[in-house]
Image: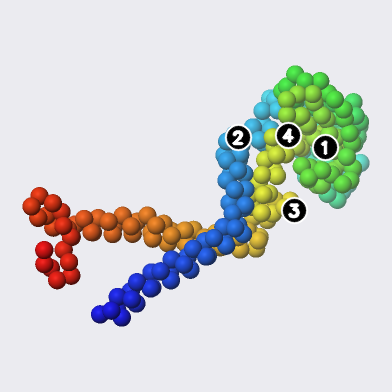
Amino acid sequence: MEKVTIKTVRKPQKLFKISHKVHKWLMLFIGVQFVIWSVTGAYMVFFDIDYIHGDSLIVNHQTKIKPEKLTYPTQALFQQYPQAENLSVGMLINREVYRFNIDKQKFMVDATNGQQLSPIAESSALAVAKHFYSGDGEVINAKLITENPPFELSSRHLPAWRINFDNFGSPALYISANSGKVVTKRHEFWRLFDWMFRFHVMDYDDGENVSNWFLFIIALLAQFAVLSGLVLTYFKVIKPAFTNNKKRGNSATFNGQDKPLNNGGES
């Protein structure tokens, strides 16, 4: 009987020690990432995603295309640009324009006379930015980006004008020099959100690879840390409470006083 008792006592103690070591060293290794997940997750949940995307920076003008203004025939356009593809009709502020592609490069011409408008000059980019910007801040500066775009602008939109406004959050609009469209809108809260997302998914390059091995390994170790923590919770919280209740349930009352029974069952 004594051997069985020693054996049953040592097994839980061994499990407790192993869980304690595993939990301690794993949390020492990945504990900082737990904090990063908490902070970055809270930031991404706190801000409205539409605000982060900068939708509030843009006024959606419902300007209708007037067919009578399309005086430059498409037949003449294809004669002038025989390799034109994906032809569409749109607006450049209050002007009807044709937009099309040639070898993945965007072009824009006036729909009234066929005049090529792309790439647009700085004055036209400023006019487009002011037309669509919803704030009341003044333009700080304008810069044409032709190569090495910042992380917030995709290279497929190059060349593009960056128009910075003097408002809360340092908003900026990116205008495609070839299509005259607002291709991207950014502010400081989006830029911080982008870094938060990168730290959250542990992709410190561009934040697009959410299935990277680094995240998988840390998440797997986190599961072991959680399981070992649950084992420690059992031994430190649940088991002591259960043991105390069991001892109180096995006590006997003699002469108005509780007295635990001995091994022989005698009082």
**How much space separates mark 3 and mark 2, taking CA atoms?**
23 Å
**How much space separates mark 4 and mark 2, taking CA atoms?**
13 Å
The crowd level at tag 2 (other Cα within 10 Å; few <14, some 14-19, many 20+) is few
Quarter holding residue 65 = top right
The numbered mark, 1 or 2, whose residue comes first in the sequence reads: 2
Three-letter amino acid code of the residue under disc 2: Phe
Residue bearing mark 1: 176
Residue bearing mark 2: 47
The quarter in which the C terminus is drawn is: bottom left
Residue bearing mark 4: 188
Judge by depth and name the residue closer to the eye, 10 or 90.
Answer: 10
**How much space separates mark 3 and mark 4, taking CA atoms?**
19 Å
Three-letter amino acid code of the residue under disc 4: Glu
Residue bearing mark 3: 205
The numbered mark, 3 or 1, whose residue comes first in the sequence reads: 1
The numbered mark, 3 or 2, whose residue comes first in the sequence reads: 2
**How much space separates mark 1 and mark 2, taking CA atoms?**
28 Å
State if disc 1 and disc 4 touch (CB < 8 Å): no
Vertical relation: 195 (above or below) 127 = below
